[in-house]
RNA sequence: GGGCCGGUAGCUCAGUGGUAGAGCAUCUGACUUUUAAUCAGAGGGUCGCGGGUUCGAGACCCGCCCGGCUCACCA
């Protein structure tokens, strides 16, 4: 039997001892008067003398994270929502049964305590406990108290343990919630309606990506998990829902990296009668407020960097190539507009694809401060409206920060015949082996044939924005359960069965 | 998919071919304001898995599994 299983059995057998003292090992409802974070926020400024005079009563619950026993007394730290408060147990201050319970407690158990607040000799805010109760038994050894849980594989696979052992992890996901809340609140305030569109689609579109395939038994049809909600949201725009947004999951059957998870959360919003320039202003406003709501200010630390969401630089893609060119001699605007020059600096098939290729290789990683790049070639923008002055380009922009793409927006193409032509271009690319090219979506064309108002639309990657707001280097640190290969047999059902048979 | 790095006690990590280690955790004892509590003692290992080289492998070689970083792909 492994050490871990011996510990498990030891703790399992303690369940009976707890019951023998008259407690339920898995507890019952417990009405705390206050949370540990509330106590820390409210009483940290109070001096020992102030607390001594008031002896504020508290009733708290939490998980035992440290224990220091000293014979007839002892200290423990209880954790709640990632924050810890010390409690002091003294034999004289509680009854005999509760003291026996205290002696049975293990690291990781969840308990409730009544008492009053005071400061110890060393000045730490603590609860002087006069009553204890038991709320839930822990059967597993906790990670080391000093280093916490560092094994990233265990952190991702057993996020519950990560949340217990690494208090800051909760803060990351609180911040993620604040990001989503901020976008939602801002868009609602501007008259956008939140909608939900299909995640299972018989045609996939709205992005360049390979899909996951699944199957519906009763209808006997293959369905794709959506790669984007775009084409459905624009059907709603065509139907007269003038401002809509959706915050939900997209699925792309592609590589996994520090910036890519196969399922990820996208905000998409569409505003009738607006164009991409309106969206540039809106984007700057949204991100600025998200930074404030998520971090308290517009300047956000990211690694060695500080990202300022209070201002948003803007370049056209061509300007960016001229500006951020890596070689010693920067190209001129005339060169960057010249298809021959572009094709002499990239292997891609068309001038537009060459421009994007050059941009990605030379510029993307240089876009540290939040930046809008606009005017994208038509070949890579099958759903965006062409620029009125330059039909090779579209009225489209992307948002970059920390060298990472975080958003994509454009004036929506609402001319059904031009959209038909673009789909056919995509089909031609598919013929040539481009697995990510769009499918023809005739129902979408039909919707456009009814007349879709001129519209601006945008998608923002919530995970990536959250990375920026939480100073996270990997997207897996902002997704509670990132995709990993299955773990295989765990064996804990056997442990429970064996322990309970003894 | 390619390259690089990692997997040793529950956790965090040492261990450059010669008897598998430390700290924390666990168990026993002492201790009524400690805080990485302290003190005395004890137990705990499929060295990721499978082959190979060797008198001898945790270490060297080959294959595989899992993870991380990175490149490719992508948002």
Image (spheres, rainbow, N blue to C red):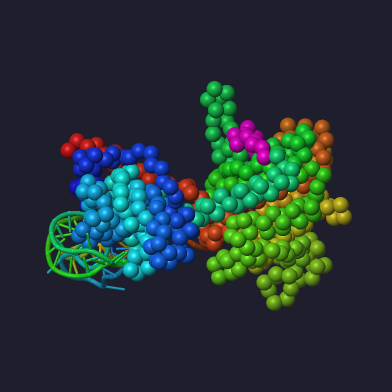
Q: Is residue A267 rendered magenta in the image?
A: no
Please state, as top left, top right, bottom left or bottom right, where the C terminus of chain A lies in the image: top left
What main secondary structure does the magenta stretch of the protein show? loop
Quadrant location of residue A489? Answer: top left
Q: Indicate the position of residue A301 as horizontal and vertical percent values.
A: 58, 66
Q: Nearer the viewer, residue A25 or A295?
A: A25
Q: Is residue A428 visible?
A: no
- Give the left or right position of residue A196, taking residue A375 as reference: left
Task: Give x and y (percent) for residue A17.
Answer: 20, 43
Looking at the image, is A28 positioned above or below residue A125?
A: above
Q: Quadrant of residue B28?
A: bottom left
Residue at 87% in and 55% down: A389
Place of residue A495 in the rendered image (x, y in percent of width and height, measured from the top left)? 25, 41
Q: In the drawing, does residue A58 fall left or right of residue A94?
A: right
Q: Which is nearer the eye, A302 or A53?
A: A53
Residue displayed at 33% across by 57% down: A128
Residue A329 is left or right of residue A104, and the answer is: right
Residue A200 shown in magenta: yes
The residue depicted at 72 percent of the width and 58 percent of the height is: A284
The answer to whether residue B60 is above or below residue A411 is below
Query: Which residue occupies 69% across, 54% down?
Result: A286
Q: Is residue A139 visible?
A: yes
Q: Which residues are magenta?
A: A194-207
In this picture, is A295 found above or below A218? below
Height in image: A124 above or below A12?
below
């Amino acid at each position: 039997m492994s050490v871990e299983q011996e510990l498990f059995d030891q703790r399992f057998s303690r369940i009976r001892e707890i019951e023998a003292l008259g407690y339920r090992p898995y507890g019952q409802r417990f009405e705390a008067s206050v949370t540990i974070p509330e106590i820390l926020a409210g009483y940290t400024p109070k001096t020992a003398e102030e607390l001594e005079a008031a002896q504020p009563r508290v009733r708290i619950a939490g998980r035992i994270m440290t224990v220091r026993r000293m014979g007839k007394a002892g200290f423990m730290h209880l954790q709640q929502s990632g924050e810890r408060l010390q409690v002091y147990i003294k034999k004289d201050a509680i009854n005999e049964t509760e003291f026996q319970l205290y002696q049975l407690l293990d690291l990781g158990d969840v308990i409730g305590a009544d008492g009053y607040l005071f400061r110890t000799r060393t000045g730490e805010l603590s609860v002087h406990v006069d009553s204890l109760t038991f709320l839930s038994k822990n059967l597993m050894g906790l990670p080391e108290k000093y280093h916490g849980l560092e094994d990233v594989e265990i952190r991702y696979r057993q996020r519950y343990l990560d949340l217990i052992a690494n208090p800051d992890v909760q803060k990351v996901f609180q911040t993620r919630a604040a990001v989503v809340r901020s976008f939602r609140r801002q868009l609602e305030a501007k008259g956008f309606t939140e909608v939900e569109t299909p995640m299972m689609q018989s045609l996939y579109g709205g992005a360049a990506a390979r899909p996951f395939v699944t199957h519906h038994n009763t209808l006997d049809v293959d369905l794709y998990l959506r790669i984007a909600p775009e084409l459905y949201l624009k059907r709603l725009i065509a139907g007269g829902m003038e401002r809509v947004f959706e915050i939900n999951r997209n699925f792309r059957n592609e590589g996994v990296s520090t910036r890519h998870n196969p399922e990820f959360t996208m905000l998409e919003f569409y505003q009738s009668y607006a164009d991409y320039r309106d969206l540039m202003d809106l984007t700057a406003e949204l991100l600025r407020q998200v930074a404030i709501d998520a971090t308290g200010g517009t300047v956000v630390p990211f690694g060695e960097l500080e990202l300022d969401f209070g201002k948003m630089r803007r370049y056209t893609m061509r300007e960016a190539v001229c500006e951020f060119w890596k070689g010693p001699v920067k190209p001129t605007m005339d060169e960057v507009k010249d298809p021959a020059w572009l094709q002499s600096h990239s292997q891609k098939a068309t001038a537009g694809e060459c421009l994007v290729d050059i941009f990605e290789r030379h510029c993307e990683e240089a876009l540290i401060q939040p930046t809008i790049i606009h005017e994208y070639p038509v070949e890579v923008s099958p759903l965006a409206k062409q620029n009125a002055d330059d039909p090779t380009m579209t009225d489209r922009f992307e948002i970059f920060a920390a060298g990472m793409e975080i958003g994509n927006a454009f004036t929506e193409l609402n001319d059904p015949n031009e959209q038909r032509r673009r789909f056919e271009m995509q089909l031609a690319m598919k013929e040539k082996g481009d697995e990510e090219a769009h499918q023809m979506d005739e129902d979408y064309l039909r919707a456009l044939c009814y007349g879709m108002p001129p519209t601006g639309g945008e998608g923002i990657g919530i995970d990536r924005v959250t990375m920026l707001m939480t100073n996270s280097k990997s997207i897996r640190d902002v997704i509670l359960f990132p995709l990993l290969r299955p773990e295989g047999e765990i064996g804990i059902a056997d442990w429970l069965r064996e322990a309970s048979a003894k």
